[in-house]
Amino acid sequence: MANAFPILPGQTNEAYEARQKRISYPRAVSWDLVKDHEKQAYANHYQSLTRLAERGGLSPLELWCVVNDTKWYDKGDMTETKAIAWLRDLNDVEWHKF
């Protein structure tokens, strides 16, 4: 995917399960999804979207928070699993199969 924002697999149970079961895990999203959320990226991570991308991106849950203009501590009952399900409903998501 050209002009993509990366997604970190991290050390989550969901990433571990994807590796163990060899199922797909989100790898990147279109930059268009994140481009209008620079302010929230700074609020949550004290870094620009470009810098976050250079460092490997965000986890699915962190990405959901940024795109939904939500502070990390205000995410309510949103979980990594729910964030991955949200990504499955979007277009322009690149998936990696372990």
Image: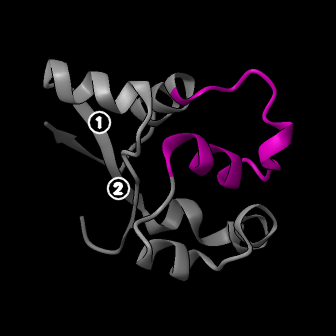
The residue sitting at 41% across, 24% down in the picture is: 13
Could you say where residue 29 lies in the image, as x and y percent from the top left? 40, 55
The residue sitting at 64% across, 80% down in the picture is: 48
17 horizontally vs 81: left or right = left
8 horizontally vs 32: left or right = left
Dot 1 lies on which element?
strand
Q: Is 5 a magenta residue?
A: no
Residue that badge 2 annotates:
28
65 horizontally vs 31: left or right = right
Q: Which residues are magenta?
A: 59-80
Quarter of the picture holding the C terminus: top left
Figure coloring = one colour
Pointer 1: residues within 10 angstroms few (<14), some, or many (20+)? many
Residue type at tag 1 = Tyr
Pointer 2: residues within 10 angstroms few (<14), some, or many (20+)? many
State the residue lying farthest toward the right.
Answer: 74
The residue sitting at 78% across, 72% down in the picture is: 39
Could you say where residue 9 lies in the image, as x and y percent from the top left? 36, 45
Residue that badge 1 annotates:
25
Q: Quadrant of residue 74?
A: top right
Q: Is 63 a magenta residue?
A: yes
Could you say where residue 38 lies in the image, as x and y percent from the top left? 70, 73
Dot 2 lies on which element?
strand
Q: CA distance from mark 2 to mark 1?
A: 10 Å
Nearer to us in this view, 89 or 23: 23
The residue sitting at 75% across, 72% down in the picture is: 42
